[in-house]
Amino acid sequence: MSGARLAGTALLSVGTLPCLGFGVFGMLASFEVTGAERWTAFAIYATIEVGMLLGLIFVWRWALAPDLVPGACGHCGYQLRGVGGDHCPECGATIDEPR
């Protein structure tokens, strides 16, 4: 995991969290509207909120993913130089590419 990648993701999250808070207030304010506009406004705010949350989850999973190094197991990152066989000794995953 790269320090710059982690720092950028943390900065993005800090910038996104206030937007999520404003979205929650927008959803609450949509209940002050009467009629069909209420549910339209609520659906718009809810869609934006869910999209932002899924985006944050995706970005954090990307930031915390291990950096893949040549000659390492694609599943756990264990260095496979000098390891015989077709399974990783650390996690047991099948090794697909030759070393």
Image (spheres, helix red, strand yellow):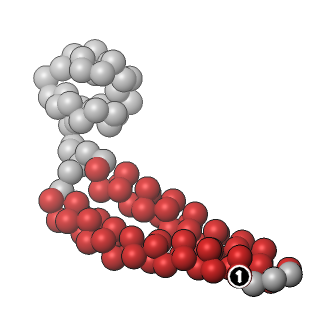
Which quadrant: the C terminus?
top left
Circle 1 residues within 10 Å: few <14, some 14–19, many ≥20: few
53 left or right of 85 in image = right
In the image, residue 5 sits, relative to residue 78, either above or below, namely below
64 left or right of 20 in image = left
Question: Which residue type carries mark 1?
Answer: Glu
Quarter of image, res 40: bottom right
- Residue 52 on image: x %, y %: 50, 68
Q: Which residue is outermost to the front?
A: 32
Report whether residue 82 is seen: yes
77 left or right of 97 in image = left
- Residue 65 on image: x %, y %: 30, 48
- Looking at the picture, tell me which residue is in the foreground, 42 or 94: 42
Q: Disc 1 marks which residue?
A: 32
**What residue is at 18 percent from the left and 20 percent from the top?**
83
Q: How many labels were placed on the picture?
A: 1
In the image, residue 60 sits, relative to residue 77, either above or below, namely below
Report whether residue 41 is seen: no
- Residue 2 on image: x %, y %: 18, 56
- Looking at the picture, tell me which residue is in the foreground, 43 or 75: 43
**What residue is at 39 percent from the left and 70 percent from the top?**
17
Quarter of image, res 93: top left
**What residue is at 30 percent from the left and 21 percent from the top?**
91
In the image, residue 81 sits, relative to residue 40, either above or below, namely above
81 left or right of 57 in image = left
- Residue 23 on image: x %, y %: 54, 76
In the image, residue 29 sits, relative to residue 57, either above or below, namely below
Q: Kindly state the secondary structure of the residue where label 1 is placed.
A: helix
